[in-house]
Structure formats: C-alpha cells, structure tokens
Amino acid sequence: MRFPMRPASIGKPLFFLALTLLAPLGLFAQQSSSAYGPLPVFELHSGFWINLHHTLYYEAKKREPPANAQQKNNPFPQLKMKTMGDASSALSPAERQSWDSAVAYYAANYADKDLLFNTDLMLLKNQLGDFEGCDELSGQRKKTCDAGLPPKITQVLEAAAAVYRTHLWADHDRANRRWIARVAPLVEEQGVGISERLADIYQTKWPREKIRVDVSAYANWAGAYTTLDPLRVTISSTDPRNQGDGALEVLFHEASHGIAEVVQQAIIRECRQRGKAIPRDLWHALIFYTTGEVIKPVLNPVSKESADKQEGGISSPDPSPGVARDTYIPYAVREGLYQRGWDDYLQLLTRFWQPYLESKATFDDAIAHIVSAL
Ligand SMILES: [Zn+2]
C-alpha cells in the first residue's frame, strides 16, 4: 500500500528528485561542514519534521499497551529525552491543546503501527526528512515547501510544529548535534575502512551514495531502525544504548541492514536445500556479530595489536589487564541479546562464521556449516 499522496504531487517526480539531490545541502550539512568537513559513508541529519514526527509517535505510543512480548520486556528505554510533559508548566492553554490533539491524532492513527514495517509511516518519515529545510509542509507560503502529504496530517504537524519549536526542538536538536559531534571523528577516521570491510564480508558493494541517517531524539523501541528503498537509517540520540563508542557500531549495524542481503539469501537457499525451516533471527544475529567483530579492533587498538601479533586475524582476544582505555564490548554482548534467545546462534557464529571473518573458510562453506548445524 502506498502512502495516499494527493494527486497533485504524483505528477511531480522531477520536483521530488530535485529535492532529494538538494537534501545534502540542507541546513545541518551546511552548518556542520565547518566542524568535520563532509563525512565519508554517511550523511548525518538533525531534521525538524522527522524529530517532531517521532516525538509525537513516542508520546502517543506511551499511552498504548505494548503490542508484543519484545516491547513488553522493553517498553521504553530510559531515554534522556525532554518530553512535552517536562515542559508542561511553560505551555499556554492553546499550546497544550494543539499538542494534545496532535498526540491524540497519532494515538488514533499511528501508535499501533510499526515505524519500521508500516509503509505509510515509512513514506511519511522519508518525506519529512526531505522537507527538513522547510518551516511548513503545506506550501502555503512557499510553493517548494508543499510536501504533498494528505491535508489532515499536514495540518496536524503544522499545528504541533509551533509548540514543538518553542518548547522542545532546541533541546532535541542539541542532543542530536552532540551525538553527531561525538561520532563524526570516528566516521571520518574509520568510516571508509569499516564500510569496505563489511561490504567485502557480505560479498557486495557499499552503496555509492552516502547513506542518509536521520538522528532523532526518539527513533523506535529498539533505539534505531532502517528502511530500504531508499536505504535510510533513523537513530535515537538520547537512547543510552547508542552512546559513546557504541554510536559507531549502531551506525554500521543499521547500514548492514541495507547491504547484507546476500547473506540473507544464502541462509534461505541453504535452508531450502536441506528442507529446514528458515530461522527468523539468524541473519540478524549474524549482522550483529559481524559488526561487533569488525568494530572491536577499531575501538580497541591495543587488542588489535595483540591480535595481529597472534595471527593477523580480526578476532581480538581480551586485552591484557591494566589497559587504560575502556574495552569496547559489542552491542549484542553488552545488551544481552545472545542470552535472550540467541545463545545457539552465538555458538554457531563463533564456530563457523568467525573462521570466515579470519579468512580461514569461504563464505559458502561458513553459511553451509551454520545451516547444517541448526
Ligand atoms: Zn538490526
């Protein structure tokens, strides 16, 4: 199902193409260029509308009972995110009413839908990203700011925008920029190398265009998500799971959702040949494992040296005691993903995928061994 665009917008493909091409020149890119220069591999945005959209979704979602077991276990991460509740004493009655009715609209129309899997939400998000340089969505004041969205959602977002801009946006934007500033030097130094290594592992090419990443106070229950066609990543700047060096891993884990298709296909093919059910999360566990292994030596230079001395592999043993720098622990280990049902996968990956990462086995053999051991 496509997002119900107004007919007027459907006839404007060139208009949209032009905006897409202009997007990298948007507000944030211009302002950040003096600090870090254009980054390789990723294009990091802190966009107003995308942040407003996710904040409304977050506040609406908080009114809902959790939709599934996974969300029940982790309904809302402890975000360091300012909400309208925190600002409530500063709101005028009219502002409170505008905001409440926007949250109510999201509660009625979107809160039960998944930001990652629902097509309407994906298209809305992408469109709001493309219009980050506009201070309206209806095009009433400026024709090029007609986002072509259905009138109702345009009206809801524009009405909430003034309240959001006055009471939350500065705070959210600051959190986003802080997150970007923290990860940017790592992307600048290591981004190309990591992207080439991952593309090589997944037997593919890294996308030629930089991957757009929308940094948002809230992203989704998982802290980050990635939508395909076009490949776009949304990451929460206030989620504790995405902080510090972990930011670099989250970026590349999310990007891997877009480039590890070959692995997914290989797993499916091997399962079919062996008449086995396709394990739902094996592919996801594999990209978690892989990103962690690729990132670890980059963030633990000492353990990389000792790994190189040992046998030149990318596997890094625990660094020697007394190493001053904090040891980087991959996301899946740190957040306990393996203990929560992926323990068998971890064993298979360590046994059969790790040798491939160390160039001691071929891709096809590694996948075949993993699937036959399932
Ligand atoms: Zn993932």
Image: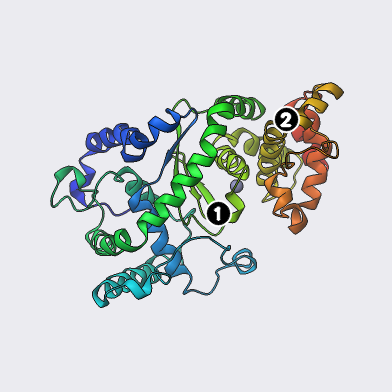
Question: Mark 2 or 1, which is nearer the eye?
Answer: 2
What's the CA distance linking mark 2 and mark 1?
A: 27 Å
Mark 1 CB near ligand 1 (8 Å cut): no
The kind of residue tagged 1 is Gly
Q: Position of residue 229 (x, y in %)?
A: 44, 39
Front residue of this view, candidates 270 and 88: 88
Q: Quadrant of residue 105?
A: bottom left
Residue pictured at 77% horizontal, 30% vertical: 302
- Does 202 appear above or below 53? above
Residue pictured at 56% horizontal, 29% vertical: 191
Badge 1: how crowded within 10 Å, few (<14), some, or many (20+)?
many
Front residue of this view, candidates 117 and 217: 217
Residue 41 as seen in the image, left or right of residue 275: left
Residue 279 as seen in the image, left or right of residue 355: left
Q: Quadrant of residue 54?
A: bottom left
- Does 131 appear above or below 162? above
Q: Earlier in the sequence, mark 2 or mark 1?
A: 1
Q: Position of residue 219 (x, y in %)?
A: 48, 54
- Secondary structure, mark 1, is loop
Q: Quickly name the residue at label 1.
A: 223
The kind of residue tagged 2 is Pro
Front residue of this view, candidates 91 and 143: 91
Q: Quickly name the residue at label 2.
A: 301
